[in-house]
Image (cartoon, rainbow, N blue to C red):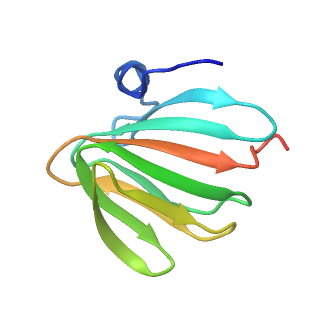
Amino acid sequence: MNIHSIPAFAAAAVANHPGRAATTLAHDCADVRVVVFRIEPGQQVPVHTSPSSVVLMIVSGGGIVVGAAGEREVRAGDMVTYDPKEPHGMRATVEPLVIAAVIAPGPAA
């Protein structure tokens, strides 16, 4: 068993581009990948697809998520699920947004 701090992962996340969200890989194996996103106001993760199921757990803050059904506002404590190949993206609005994204099966599968 391993116990991890999502806020610590979010604090250590790194952005590869100034307009993009900071990310860190929290767990990765063939069965599941967990990525922690720290998205500052005005930043976004552009809409994209995945061949896997994606579950977003909103850890702190609030913002907008995008999916096949359009845009929805989310807050800490919300969970958003996407089917395989469903377009999805997210953005922070007025406060930082921390999301733990669970991708299963992992992209390496």
For the residue pair 43 and 97, the one nearer the viewer reads as: 97
Report the side of 103 relative to 74 (left or right).
right
For the residue pair 40 and 59, the one nearer the viewer reads as: 59
In the rendering, at what x and y percent does residue 74 appear?
29, 60
Report the side of 9 relative to 76 (left or right).
right
In the rendered view, tell whether residue 10 sits above or below residue 87.
above
Residue occupying the point 59% across, 37% down:
34
Residue occupying the point 53% across, 63% down:
81
Report the side of 9 relative to 83 (left or right).
left
Dividing the image into 4 quarters, which one contains the C terminus?
Answer: top right
In the rendering, at what x and y percent does residue 12 appear?
40, 18
Dividing the image into 4 quarters, which one contains the N terminus?
Answer: top right
In the rendering, at what x and y percent does residue 86 appear?
61, 71
In the rendered view, tell whether residue 5 sits above or below residue 92.
above
Query: Which residue extends farthest right?
Result: 109
Query: Which residue extends farthest front?
Result: 1
In the rendering, at what x and y percent does residue 39 appear?
33, 41
**Quarter occupied by residue 96:** top left
Residue occupying the point 34% across, 35% down:
18
Residue occupying the point 46% across, 61% down:
80
In the rendered view, tell whether residue 29 sits above or below residue 85.
above
For the residue pair 92 and 42, the one nearer the viewer reads as: 92
For the residue pair 15 and 76, the one nearer the viewer reads as: 76
Q: How many marks?
A: 0
Query: Which residue extends farthest bottom?
Result: 69
